[in-house]
Amino acid sequence: MLIQPVVLSGGSGTRLWPLSREKYPKQLLPLIGEDSLLQATVRRVEGITGAQLAAPMVVCNEEYRFVIAEQMRLMGKDGPIVLEPVGRNTAPALTLAALAAMRDGADPILLVMPADHVILDTPAFQAVVFEGALLAEEGAVVTFGITPDCPETGYGYIQTGVALGKGEACKIARFVEKPDLVTAQSYLDTGTYLWNSGLFMMRASVWLAAIGVCRGDILAACRMAWDAGSVDGCFLRVGKEAFSQCPKDSIDYAVMERIAALDAALPVGVVIPLSAGWSDVGAWDALWKVLPKDSDGNVLQGDVLMHDCRNTLTMSAGRLVACIGVDDMVIVETPDAILVSHKDKTQEVKTIVDRLKRDGRIEGQLHRKVFRPWGSYDGVDAGERFLVKRIIVNPGACLSLQMHHHRAEHWIVVRGTARVTREDTSYLVTENESTFIPLGNKHRLENPGCVPLEMIEVQSGSYLGEDDIVRFEDKYGR
């Protein structure tokens, strides 16, 4: 039995702003422990007994490809990364994954996992996954329903049907949209409803057959995009024009709700209860629930001091944050934005992100520290006609060969060694040395060493925007 882990990494996590941002969303962040949520999702399946595991496959937006590739590399994982040129929701994403999984004639069992969920009890999760794999091997489409412990209004629900007599598995009776509080309490009281986790298992061929019956237009568009695709190292690219024509739909709407209606042309839909400390960490209050707390119910991360506070989450990315006499609050400090919210209002953080976007402010999209395929840069200071950045270039990495129309650059090496190309000259710059790149000069920065290259860059000129870059050569295909 071959299980193919499929990690869907397309969400933006706007309710966890200011840590999660559009161009660096929550699945890429280490919110629980040292691993990012993406890495924790991949690591969660390691060690499942009774089955063979294929290298994990990630389906993601092109914009995240280099960060995800680097996070997978750090884990020693070399599975394929399927790139979506545009977002089309989870049903097309899974269809691409199924086509990719079958490209060499295999038909593995797909274990479909969102990249941004938390599961605290890994052994319990793995036991239920193995139970699901046995049913998926027989042709069922399996989902995992979370055993509810409160009348949650932020999740969809699954009503369980007839028991299959195989463990705790039941047929799916129906899917239900997010209820109001009274309805959610009634679901809890009946004991027949589970939270919809977004976790699925099925054979790749079974999914393609099911999506073909339910949404043949999605399958046709995905096949056309797949056939127009190409392989770029670990990246599997699909045709942009064809995929852009693909309708948007979720796995639930496209297939699972129709399976629940017992359509005879579809495979059996099965739900298995899962009690493993699951959370979709969809907002700050959900993150507070799963993080370790002190005796007063407070979560503290970073440089934080608290006095007479209870049930409060406080995070500092750098500066000292001191809290006095606050209860049930969320306080999150980052270098360029601070969030202060009552814990009951954290679902409304999205309204702030929407306003930032409407006002054209960058804080909704990017952190002050911006990751690039070659490393990262951090905007340290800025003023009229100048900008100061701290630049980190990974060992062996290089920036594009480029030129700027409106700015000059002064580079000071703080750590490591830089190889600088300026017009027709190439030379080394070592620690405590500097060099100058005049406006209009063609140039490139490389790290030939085995330690990260750390530099301070001072830009000066009439315009300092990131779009003032003319690229001549770029190993990353930008």
Image (cartoon, rainbow, N blue to C red):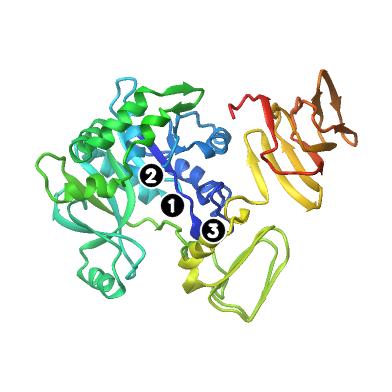
Q: Give the amino acid type for the residue marked by disc 1 in the picture.
A: His
Distance from disc 1 to disc 3, alpha carbons, whole Å, reads 28 Å
Residue 264 seen by the camera: yes
Disc on the earlier residue, 1 or 3:
1
Q: Give the amino acid type for the residue marked by disc 2 in the picture.
A: Met
When the figure is inspected, residue 261 is found, relative to residue 373, above or below; the finding is: below
Near mark 1 (Cα within 10 A), the count class, few <14, some 14-19 or many ≥20, is: many
Secondary structure of the residue carrying tag 1 is loop
Residue 460 is situated, as x and y percent measured from the top left of the image, at 83, 43
Near mark 2 (Cα within 10 A), the count class, few <14, some 14-19 or many ≥20, is: many
Secondary structure of the residue carrying tag 2 is strand
**Numbered badge on residue 358:** 3
**Numbered badge on residue 113:** 2
Whether residue 184 sits left or right of residue 436 in the image: it is left
Given contact means CB atoms under 8 Å apart, are the residues at marks 2 and 1 in contact? yes
* The N terminus, quarter of image: top left
Q: Which residue is mark 1?
A: 117
Distance from disc 2 to disc 1, alpha carbons, whole Å, reads 8 Å
Q: Nearer the viewer, residue 187 or 399?
A: 399
Task: Locate residue 425: give its quadrant.
Answer: top right
Whether residue 306 sits left or right of residue 191 in the image: it is right
**Numbered badge on residue 247:** none
- Residue at 30 percent of width and 63 percent of height: 178
Residue 475 is situated, as x and y percent measured from the top left of the image, at 63, 24
Q: Give the amino acid type for the residue marked by disc 3 in the picture.
A: Arg
Near mark 3 (Cα within 10 A), the count class, few <14, some 14-19 or many ≥20, is: few
When the figure is inspected, residue 180 is found, relative to residue 383, above or below; the finding is: below
When the figure is inspected, residue 82 is found, relative to residue 214, above or below; the finding is: above
